[in-house]
Image (spheres, helix red, strand yellow):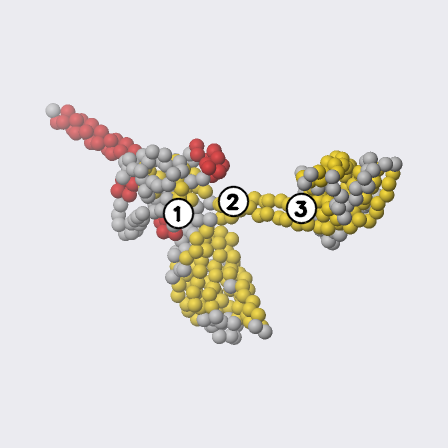
Amino acid sequence: MKNEGDKQYKGLRLTGEIYHAAQENLADLRLFDQDGQPVPYFMHSFSPQETAVHKSHPMELIHSFTKGDSFYYDYAVDVPEDEDVLATSLTVVTNHANFAKQVELFGSYDNRHWEKIKDALLYRVEGNEKLEIPLGPPAPKYTHYRFKIPNNLEKIAFTGVTLNYNDVTLSHERFTETFTPQYTIEEQGQKTLIKLSGLRNLKLDSFTLETDSIFKRRVIFADIHAKTLYNLSFQQTHYSDLTLPLDGFRTSEDTAVLVIENNDDQPIQVKQLQVKYYVDELVFNGAGKTGFVLKFGHPEYTVPPTYDLVFYQDQILQEGYDLLPILALKILPADQATTAEQLWGLKDPRFLFNSVIVAVAILLGVIIIRKLIK
């Protein structure tokens, strides 16, 4: 990988070939710079997703009265059955101009017992206005709201009141990639067996079938995940669900079998298969480096490394990183006998230690034999 981009931190997205050749838990991944020095990293698997929610509920004036020099207006919201109406603000509409009024806002769940929420200033003066009252946090769930306007000599009233709920939720979505696997199809009795390859160590998100056949049939993947898929058309309306969720299923084998239960119907004509799987990214500090090499496949590394970067990864992710492309990928065949030194370009300290012990033992043996001969 060649270092590029203007950010301090860099990222590398793992490919299907890397998952196939690496250990299942990725404990053998080691990153080096252009000088062969280890580069610390942490694993990142999600992208943040923001979801905005905007709801508005018009409110109905159900009661108004005066008490002293104060005016009271009671409003109710039509609450859907078995649903709480959350509110982050109230917006009022009025025909009055050139006013500034301090109002008191109350809330109630039954239109009888009232709780004071807050004092608020509403005004419309020389083209400037403030006609919204923020609520919460937390967002209240009242079904009734009362406005008390003291000293209302101007008889300020509202032509409309709206209950608003605006929120942004942050979620995390897994990184995914999609590929078309190699597969074979075999008809066996009342079942179609589709044998997919290239799945070793992949965390599978879903499987999607592409076909023009009209059907509704049960499918089973790897004898674990099952669902009824369908592809139907009625009165020029098309209904289709051709995706089987796999919930991160992973196999240590290269192949798995998808079974379609045909019963007495003709087999489905499969046009193509799509597999979506979860992927991870390695994030690391690339400052002062020109290139990087990721090595994997060392059989003696069984525990993933832990580096300091993991303790401040939130700050790194907030800053962002450049995603580097893989310029070359070399996977050595299993039948090529290679030592750890050949694979990694590293010396195994245990091998060196054992070699020294054997050499010393041989030397001592020679010395003892010579003395015995003399």
> Farthest residue in the left direction?
374
> Farthest residue in the front direction?
126
Q: Position of residue 194 (x, y in %)?
A: 43, 65
Question: Who is closer to the viewer here, 189 or 247?
Answer: 247
Front tag of 2 and 3: 3
Residue at 57 percent of width and 70 percent of height: 237
Binning the other alpha carbons within 10 Å of mark 2 as few (below 14), some (14 to 19) or many (20 upward) gives few
**SS of the residue under disc 3:** strand
Is label 1 in contact with label 2 (beta carbons under 8 Å)? no
Question: Who is closer to the viewer here, 259 or 145?
Answer: 145
Structural distance between the alpha carbons of marks 2 and 3: 22 Å
Q: Which residue is mark 3?
A: 165
Q: Is residue 32 left or right of residue 24?
A: left
Q: Is residue 134 left or right of residue 20?
A: right
Q: Which residue is mark 2?
A: 48
Q: Is residue 311 left or right of residue 341?
A: right
Q: Amino acid at mark 1?
A: Leu
Binning the other alpha carbons within 10 Å of mark 3 as few (below 14), some (14 to 19) or many (20 upward) gives some
| Residue 135, quarter of picture | top right
> Farthest residue in the right direction?
68
Residue at 54 percent of width and 66 percent of height: 240
Q: Tag 2 or tag 1, which sits nearer the N-term?
A: 1
Counting labels gives 3
Q: Amino acid at mark 3?
A: Tyr
Structural distance between the alpha carbons of marks 3 and 1: 41 Å
- Quadrant where the N terminus sits is top left
Front tag of 1 and 2: 2
Residue at 31 percent of width and 38 percent of height: 290
Front tag of 3 and 1: 3
Structural distance between the alpha carbons of marks 1 and 2: 19 Å
State whether residue 168 appears in this view: yes
Q: Which residue is mark 1?
A: 14
